[in-house]
Image (cartoon, grey):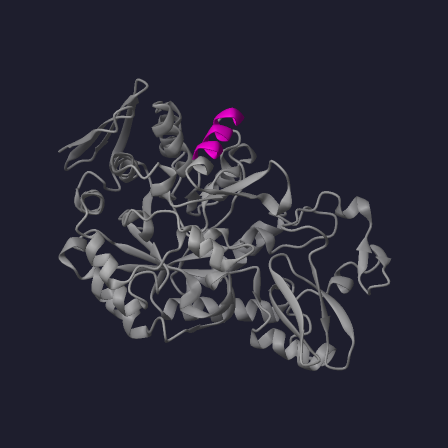
Amino acid sequence: MNRGTMLNAYPDSMGGKLSDIVEILKKEEFKDAIQSFYILPSMFHTDLDRGFSVQDYDLEESLATREDLQNLMDMGIDLKLDFILNHASVLSPQFQDLIKNGTSSKYADFFINWNAFWEGCGTMTEEGYIQPEEELIKDMFFRKPGLPILMLEFSDGTKVPYWNTFYQKVWEEKGETKYLGQMDLNIRSELVWEFYDETLKKLSSYGAAIVRLDAFAYASKEVGKKNFFNEPQTWEILKRLQKIADKYELSFLPEIHASYGEGRYEQVAKEGYMTYDFFLPGLMIDALESGDGSHLKNWAEEICTKKFSVVNMLGCHDGIPLLDLKGLLPDERIQNLIDTVVSRGGYVKDLHGAKNVYYQVNATYYSALGEDDKKMLLARAIQMFMPGKPQVWYLDLFAGVNDHEAVKRAGEGGHKEINRTNLSLTEVNERLKKPVVQKQLELMRLRNTHPAFSEDATMDFASNGKNIEITWAGKQASVTLKANLKTYDYEVVL
């Protein structure tokens, strides 16, 4: 895996379609600034969650074409694409066939029949679903209140519950029941594994080098287990998937949110996988607000000492992770971080409705830093000198501010739209003139082109509180970042 900077955007984030982004990346301002591009999954046929509810993995050609993808690769930009392992849309051909043909459907076991799964382990309710015994369900991890089921009505009128961890919507239209939702796949079905193989082959054909495994920790379902990162089943699933990936020369990046104290990130890394550095976004804000670089230093040294292969970031399509910081930062510092970002217009998202169990805060990173150009530039400079592969959210690069109007338009559950503003070509060209954008691109170019950031390089992170100094030294060259966390001044010493 190259260590160069990775852009992160939707296919319509800049200009309206992927071909527009291709032309933007050809501009002189972007020369040598981008080595990889993580294109979010609205480039596929999807219906919900801005791409994460996939109907099928064919390209949505109004947004992206094979020609666009080839053009990116011809520019020397490799691709990272999503594979949503745990679920598929109710509008997928498999689920539509199930609705139409019921138990005689070819895909009868492609999704998880709740009652079949829990047979003999609970009591049938009047509503037609099994209520599992309390002892078997008390430790289960749910993403929303109540049991994770959708009551599906077959064409013959039979009602059957199916496992539904994430979103669902059910309504009547002209006397017919309509559904939207993300239905969990049955990992025990060989048809699902055939689908996995077909999907990874297709992603490879698009030019993917890295495949992000979305929601992989939910895929294993076992009676009496937490059903989030079940062991050893989760490892067995990853091992089987890896054999498929090897056929198509793909690298996996499993996506998982869990607290530092749980050590899940380390388990994934020790198995040889890349992992997300979901700790850096919060640690960075903490360092810039407190003027104390000690926690950043400790984390950078842990990555290097344990030789983790990480993809780091500041902002992203989801939000700024907070649950992950537990055990790495004192709880009062996490709360101060939450309070600060919320006071600057951010929204707190509680984890599946639980009080005081913070999952993420939704804000642009620029707004989270008080819309301060110096803070944004220092944050980007430090990111470029942290170990790992830096991922850059397009809106951070263009110093985007919180979009509260977009949240209002999206309605209930639309908090993530605060950090997903699409930029027109005119807006992109205007923002490219801003020093805060130009200087970020300079830092990204340095990260991509300076020989000190090589596989054989070593990192030294010195901190005496407000002053930090990060040096990368390889066989050919060295480079140092000197920064003051109180004044937000920095210099790069070549």
Q: Is residue 2 visible?
A: no
Which residue is pictured at 43% across the width and 50% down the height?
404
Instruction: Residue 197: give x, y in percent of width and height.
Output: 50, 68
Task: Give, as a single range, the part of the protein colored magenta.
Answer: 330-340
Instruction: Residue 462: give x, y in percent of width and height.
Output: 28, 22
Locate the C terminus and report the quarter of the image it occupies. top left
**Does the stretch in magenta take in 338?**
yes
Would residue 415 appear left or right of 287 to someone viewing this image? right
Would residue 336 appear left or right of 185 to someone viewing this image? left
On screen, residue 43 above or below 469: below
The foreground one among 264 and 60 is 60
Would residue 256 appear left or right of 155 to someone viewing this image? left
Instruction: Residue 87: give x, y in percent of width and height.
Output: 57, 62
Quadrant hosting residue 489 = top left
Quadrant hosting residue 359 = top right
**Does the stretch in magenta take in 334?**
yes
